[in-house]
Amino acid sequence: VEQRQLAERQRVAGNAAFKAAQYSEALRCYQMGLESERTNMALHANAAQAAIKLSCYVQAIEHCDKVR
């Protein structure tokens, strides 16, 4: 439960950064959340979107592959 809560806090922080167009910070938050909960599909999807905004397409594909 504690790991899930940490992942959720990072997702919320990442979403705030994404909305502020701080894509590097958003991606960092999502990746930190994934360290706590590797199977969190929302974090992988959000990380993929942030990676796309940063033109990190290979990284985006890697996150998408984990969402399927």
Image (tube, rainbow, N blue to C red):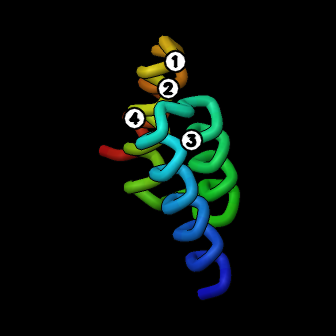
Task: Residue at 57%, 57% (x, y): give it.
Answer: 13
Task: Residue at 54%, 23% (x, y): give it.
Answer: 59
Mark closer to the chain start, 2 or 3: 3
Q: Position of residue 67 (x, y in %)?
A: 36, 46
Task: Residue at 48%, 39% (x, y): give it.
Answer: 20
Between 43 and 18, the residue placed more toward the observer is 18
User: In front: mark 4 or mark 3?
Assistant: 3
Q: Position of residue 21 (x, y in %)?
A: 47, 31
Amino acid on which the number 3 mark rests in the picture:
Ala
Amino acid on which the number 2 mark rests in the picture:
Ala
- Say above or below: 31 vs 23: below
Cα distance in 3D space between marks 2 and 3? 9 Å
Image quarter hosting the C terminus: top left
Instruction: Tell me if mark 1 has few (under 14), some (14-19) or many (20+) residues whose alpha carbon lies within 10 angstroms of its own.
Output: some
Mark closer to the chain start, 2 or 4: 2
Cα distance in 3D space between marks 4 and 3? 19 Å
Cα distance in 3D space between marks 1 and 2? 5 Å
Amino acid on which the number 1 mark rests in the picture:
Leu
Please tell me whether mark 3 sits on a helix, a strand or a loop: helix
Label 1 with label 2: CB-CB less than 8 Å: yes
Label 1 with label 4: CB-CB less than 8 Å: no
Q: What numbered label is drawn on residue 26?
A: 3
For label 1, the residue is 54
Task: Residue at 38%, 35% (x, y): give it.
Answer: 64
For label 4, the residue is 65
